[in-house]
Image (cartoon, rainbow, N blue to C red):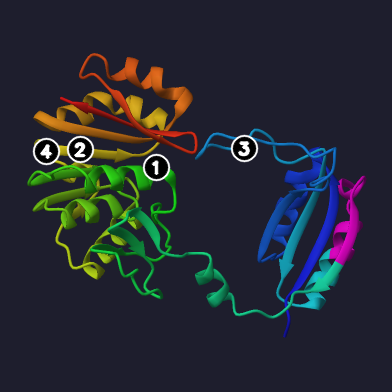
Amino acid sequence: MAMFELSLMCPEDRVEQLSDALDALDALSVSVEDADAQTDAEQALFGEPGMPPPKDGWQRSRVVALFADETLASDVATLLQAQDFFEGCQLLAMAPVQEQDWVRLTQSQFAPVEITPEFWIVPTWHEPPEQARQVIRLDPGLAFGTGTHPTTRMCLRWIATHSMPSRVLDYGCGSGILAIGAAKYGATEVVAVDIDTAAVQSTELNASANGVRLLAGLPDKAGGQYGVVLANILATPLKVLAPLLCAHVAPGGSLVLAGILERQADELIAAYAPYCRLNVAGSEDGWILMTAIV
């Protein structure tokens, strides 16, 4: 039985209420688009990565909801149009969703990612490129870090081009990709910590799949000092964590920070000034990598 898509038009001040109603009425997914996209009236909405969007929608938003079958989609359309909050909204269309091989379609969006000409992140359904000498096998999952984001690539490139000490800490490990990279490049005692238990589990599974040994856990697993401390998070938590992260770096060791926008460089330098001297070590697509010798 084919799934059905319900398309609705609504003003900006009704987007949240309409989306919540669709969620409550068993929509499999709800998305919001600019109804004026690709026209002169198109609006750009920019938000901070990892933070709530600045607005719930556009002046004229197209809300698209996916339902399991036609009967449910039709019942929801009828029910919504009878509600007071639907005033000013409009039912645009209800149509079946074309059957597709969703697994194959999803996989096609994740190709091998080049870190250096010899270092690649490769999903399990792809063969490594011929020139790859070092490979991390990683599939998209619940935890952040598949190698596709500039911050991850910059951190991995740093790892690949620096001599790894025996002890490395990955603080805010996500999928564990940086910890795995450090282990593959020579670190023998790698600790990966995160506040999210799903990230810890993901890190353990990914490490096992890549044949590397590391210790994954909640932040209290990070004990002592390390020759390299990696933290690919976001600017605000990085500022709060400055004394803790620097305390974990062994004398003469390296601190490597990412998840920072170019315009945030000065505030990070100021936050870390009492402990070390941060420098911009790389940039890509508006993101920067910052490092220091502690």
Q: Are marks 4 and 1 in contact (CB under 8 Å)?
A: no
Residue beneath the point at 11% across and 51% down: 187
Q: What amino acid does circle 2 point to?
A: Val
Report the residue marked by disc 1: 151
- SS for callout 4: strand
Counting from the top left corner in percent of width and height, residue 247 is at 15, 27
Q: What stretch is highlighted in magenta?
A: 77-93
Dot 1 crowding, Cα within 10 Å, few <14, some 14–19, many 20+: many
Report the residue marked by disc 4: 226
Counting from the top left corner in percent of width and height, residue 11 is at 85, 42
From mark 2 to mark 4, how far is it between C-alphas? 6 Å
Against 270, residue 162 (above or below) is below
Q: What amino acid does circle 1 point to?
A: Thr
Report the residue marked by disc 3: 53
Foreground label between 4 and 3: 4
Q: Do the residues labelled 2 and 4 touch (CB within 8 Å)?
A: yes
Foreground label between 4 and 1: 1
Counting from the top left corner in percent of width and height, residue 124 is at 36, 73
Residue beneath the point at 88% across and 53% down: 83
- SS for callout 1: helix
Dot 2 crowding, Cα within 10 Å, few <14, some 14–19, many 20+: many
Report the residue marked by disc 2: 229
Residue beneath the point at 62% across and 37% down: 53
